[in-house]
Image (cartoon, grey):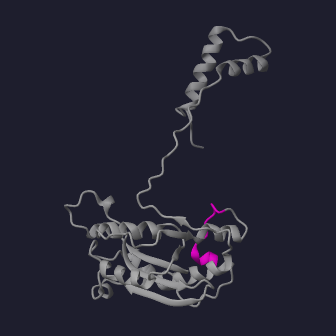
Amino acid sequence: MNYIVFDLEFNQDITSLKEYYKDKSRFPFEIIQIGALKLDIDYKTIATFNHLIKPVIYTNIAGFITELTGITMKELEKEKSFPVVFKEFLDFIGQEECILCTWGTSDMKELYRNISYHQIDHKNVPDRYINIQPFTSLHVGISKKELLSLENAVSILDIPTTYKFHDALSDAYYTAEIFKKVYHPLILPNRYDPNFVPIKPRPKKITIDFYGLIKQFEKMYGREMNSEEQEMIKLAYKMGRTNQFAKTL
């Protein structure tokens, strides 16, 4: 059994989409680099994968993406397309049982969105994965809701920064090093379902206990509130809840 620790670099330059595309939300963050390490059952690196990808959705690289990653459009123009590189990535993963490992959930989500955009069958993609990020928070003694950046996690765990960040292969390497430090047998993989849509719970209906409110006023003033006073208290409470008289100090 192997672990495939992977990382992706994305681009999304909406201004370079053609004008007739109105629903821009249907376009994914386009993957422009895939980096991965294959670890064996003893967490030893047995293979690496690193490929840039020629974009087809966006014709430009956003400036901040180039600044962050160093990747330019000139570099990408000579690379292979996503379907070709993805096929090579599947070959790298191989037929042996494996678990995907990521830093955060966005890489799994955007991988499947890119697969869907290119109309590729995802049945050969392993669906078991471990998001290492929250387990790292627990490992260093904070809530798993307090998610650390990859850089901060590397620093806290005293992992030597041999390579630059925001390169897919380098970030996959750091994620693998973190995985080796924080993994324990109680960390079990989840199954990723690209069609899963979480159901938001309906907010609970809140009713106001006006009887208790009036009784509180009567206790404060040491007497019963007459019907006019009761109506004024109710009205004031309702008006206060609308924040219509709230002022910024």
Question: In this view of the protein, can residue 45 be seen by the observer?
Answer: yes
> What residue is drawn where x is 35% and y is 81%?
87
Q: Please give the range of residues in magenta.
A: 144-154
**Residue at 30%, 67% in the rendered image:** 117
Whether residue 174 sits left or right of residue 197 in the image: it is: right
Which one is nearer the viewer's eye here, 104 or 22? 104
Question: Does any portion of residue 71 appear in the rendered image?
Answer: no
Residue 235's place in the image compared with 204, above or below, is above
Residue 179 placement: quadrant: bottom right
Q: Nearer the viewer, residue 182 or 171?
A: 182
Instruction: Work out whether residue 245 or residue 23 is closer to the camera in this orientation and state it.
Output: 23
Q: Residue furthest left?
A: 20
Q: Position of residue 36 (x, y in %)?
A: 48, 83
How far across and how far down the image is residue 31, in percent?
Answer: 37, 75
* In the rendered image, the vertical position of residue 198 relative to residue 125, given as above or below: above
Image spot of residue 38 (x, y percent): 52, 85
Residue depicted at 80% across the width and 15% down the height: 222
Measured as percent of width and height from the top left, residue 121 is found at 33, 69
